Amino acid sequence: MRHLEKTRGLLGSLPASETLGTLEKGIELEKQGVEVFMLSVGEPDFDTPEPIKQACYEAIAQGCTKYTVPAGIEELREECAAKFRSDGIETTYRQVVVTPGGKFACAAAITALCGPGDEVILPVPYWVSHRHMIHASGAKVVLVDTFPENNFELTEEDLRRYVNANTRLLILCSPSNPTGAVYRRSALETIGAYAVQNNFMVLSDEVYEKLTYDADYPHISIASLSPEINARTITVNSFSKSYAMTGWRVGFLTAPKWLSAKIDALQTHFVANVTTFAQYGALKALRDCAEECEKMRKQFALRRELFCKLLSDIPGLTFTRPAGAFYVFADISSFGLTSKDFCDQLMDEAHIAAAPGYGFGADRFVRFSYACSEETIIRASEGLAKFCAARHK
């Protein structure tokens, strides 16, 4: 008799996200009336700006509840293309695909481009889902360690060692989830030159691009560096982090026309189109909500200062000051615990949720999010300090 529960497809073999376990445990404790400090969640704690919500209400009232073309309404794609051009990326609306979140944009790009026999270079630490997306495509994951001493950037030596005739794609995430690192121009130029010379593609995940805090580490889109690099780059963005729209599920990408057409075709079969009235909310965000976006960025900047100051006083924890996103990736190796054990014990004893680094390919680290109130940051840091003091050798 066949065992139906033994799935054969690549997609059916994917595990759940490694970051979900701690979150689910925290939610269960909250249901029991326990106060939990959620430093594991990768989403802004702010509400979606009111003008965006109002645009969505109006779209519903006007009957914008039918299918759109799979790539998205033309007005939104035009605005997305204009946004990319403002970042120095030459593109047109015909190269833009609006997707159900930045996550699906990455998945669609990877699976449309890659397959068995291809290799995909993935810098470590990586965002958890990128690795599983590569597996889903059938391509081989090539993990390349990066280090805080070098801003968690790939080096020319790394590229010489790992790029070969089978290299189809290299994935960048800058600003980075989980490290908060922002790639410098020199590193991007090196990667871009290798992509051109060796004729492979780059997927640049830029969903945190508006959340940078230091003049020395501005966000730079690798596709903006030259027409030749642009011709080999998929640039992914999203409304989730910058506009506090995580639940809306609206992302967007631009790619060379030959590839964006394949991604568009894939989307026709998997999702049809992004929720129509959500697209009108996204349109409003791009057109009129830069001020609201900047207010949130400034709040994250203040929280970063506070959290880094408090963490720096905790013995045993070391970290590189993040230049972007809203995470601190702390080295917990001095405690002699795996990242899972550290996070499990932290939850059990201090009721603090953090994301274990093993899910990002870096077991000596733990990711803390400062996308929460200053009060939460202060009180959680107090609990974390006590927890660490009891274990510091």
Image (tube, grey):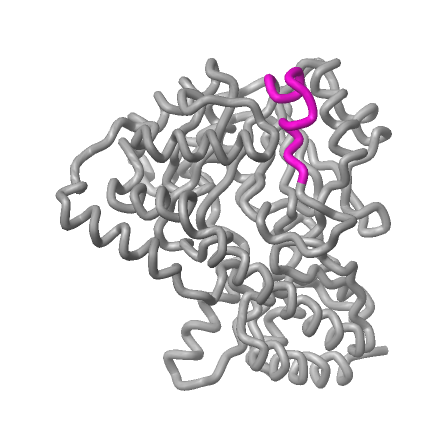
The quadrant of the image that shows the N terminus is top left
- Image height check: is 317 above or below 94? below
Q: Nearer the viewer, residue 333 or 184?
A: 184
Res 301 visible: yes
State the residue at coordinates (48%, 18%).
Answer: 259
Task: State the image coordinates of residue 28 (x, y, percent, origin top left).
Answer: 41, 74
Magenta stretch: residue 245 in it?
no
Position in image of residue 88 (x %, y %): 61, 30
Name the residue rendered at 73%, 69% in the picture: 308
Q: Which residues are magenta?
A: 220-231
The C terminus - image quarter: bottom right
Q: Is residue 222 magenta?
A: yes
Place of residue 367 in the rendered image (x, y in percent of width and height, measured from the top left):
64, 61
- Considering depth in this image, is 220 or 104 the residue closer to the camera? 220
Tally of marks: 0
Q: Would residue 92 be found to the left or right of residue 307 on screen? A: left
Q: Is residue 282 left or right of residue 171?
A: left
Q: Residue at x 74, y 73 (%)?
A: 311
**In the depicted view, which residue is nearer to us: 151 or 120?**
151
